[in-house]
Every structure is written in structure tokens, then in C-alpha cells.
Amino acid sequence: MAPARPRSSASSSSSFPRGRRIRKRADFVRIQNGGQRVTTRHLLILVAAPNEAAARGAGSRRAPLAPEPVPGAPRLGLVASRKVGGAVARNRAKRLLREAFRRFPELFPERVDIVVILRTGAGALGLDDVLAELRSVIPVLRRRARDALAGGPPAAARGAPPAADERGAEDPPGR
């Protein structure tokens, strides 16, 4: 049996540390129920202010040497159902979003929790397609992050339909 190869130590720009991930079901549920929504054709992006425990890293059963959350840095959670495709397509789509999150931090607002729900067809996207969809909603994403940090209710809870500049490119005006 061949000896196991040691894992290469990735640079900080190419890693995705635990402190930058949303891992607990309670956090996913909190963000999905109360987060600000931004839609694109293949992505539903939910933005919420971090809860106090996540912001300071309290209440977790981490090993003492586990990294603490990075203060001010956004955290990312990904959801991909079987509508996206088979396991290979789902994992590839999630890998592309993690890559965009790592390599292009300017696309994501600071100090927020972000959950991205992949929609049907996301499994066929390439990195350039993912980046184009994210870049197309940067102003709306930043506005939603400000609203979430200010403690405002989600746009859907306010009862107002989204303005034309807040809809994704694929949403028809009458929707």
C-alpha cells in the first residue's frame, strides 16, 4: 500500500476555512426564514446579519485549535437540491460558487451571512457564467446587506413588490 500523500498547504487566498462557512442547520433555517432575497436565473441569494453566537464564535463544540470566525468577513452556505442535477453536477456548481467566494471577495458584502440556493440549470454553468450572474446583482446585494444589518424586515415581508432595478434580469416586470 502506498503511503498517503500529505495535503498541500494552500495559501490563505485559496482556502475556505471553517470560520467562513455556514455549517449549522439552525443558521441555514434562520437565514432562509428571515434573510433578504436576491434572485438571478440560476441562484437565489439570501443575506442576513450574523447572529451574536456566530459573530463571536461562541456556543460551538469546536476543538480548541479550530480557527475562529474571521471578524467582519462574510460567511457562505450553499444549498443544492437534486433539481440542479446529479451529485457530480451539484458538487461542481457548489465548487464554482466557493471558488467565486474565495477569489472575488469584492462580489460579496462584508459582515453578513450569505446562503446561496442553486436553481435548476446551475449545474451546467461555468465559472464565468457564475461570476456574470453575481456581478449583475452587486448593487442589489449590497442594498440587501445594508437592510439586513440595519435590522429591516425582508423585502417580501414589507409587502411591496421589488422595484425594477431590484429584480433579477430574468424576472418579468409583471411578477
Image: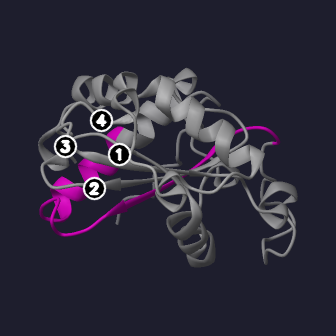
Q: CA distance from mark 4 to mark 1?
A: 23 Å
- Picture coordinates of residue 61, whole percent (x, y): 79, 78
**Residue type marked 2:** Asn
- Residue drawn at (57%, 44%) of the image: 16
Q: Position of residue 17 (x, y in %)?
A: 64, 48
Q: Position of residue 105 (x, y in %)?
A: 57, 26
Q: Alpha-carbon neighbours of circle 3 within 10 Å: few (<14), some, or many (≥20)?
A: few
Residue occupying the point 29% across, 39% down: 40
Mark 4 touching mark 3, by CB under 8 A? no
Per the image, label 1 sits on a secondary structure element best described as helix
Classify mark 4: helix, strand or loop.
loop
Q: Amino acid at mark 1?
A: Arg
Asked whether the residues under the numbered discs 1 and 2 touch, taking CB atoms below 8 Å apart as contact, a structural biologist would say yes
Q: Which residue is mark 4?
A: 168
Q: Label 4 to label 2, Cα distance in Å?
A: 24 Å
Along the viewing direction, whichever of 92 and 148 lies nearer the viewer = 148
Report the magenta residues as a range.
71-96
Numbered circle sitting on residue 32: none
Q: Residue at x 52, y 47 (%)?
A: 7
Tell me the residue that label 2 is attached to.
Answer: 91
For the residues labelled 1 and 2, the Cα–Cα distance comes to 6 Å
Look at the numbered discs 3 and 1 and tell me whether their residues touch, using CB distance below 8 Å. no
- Please state if 73 lies on the left or on the right of 98 as rendered: right
Q: CA distance from mark 3 to mark 2?
A: 34 Å
**Does 117 appear in magenta?**
no
Q: Nearer the viewer, mark 4 or mark 1?
A: 4
Residue linked to disc 1: 95
Mark 4 or 3: the one toward you: 3
Mark 4 or mark 2: name the one nearer the start of the chain.
2
- Res. 59 image quadrant: bottom right
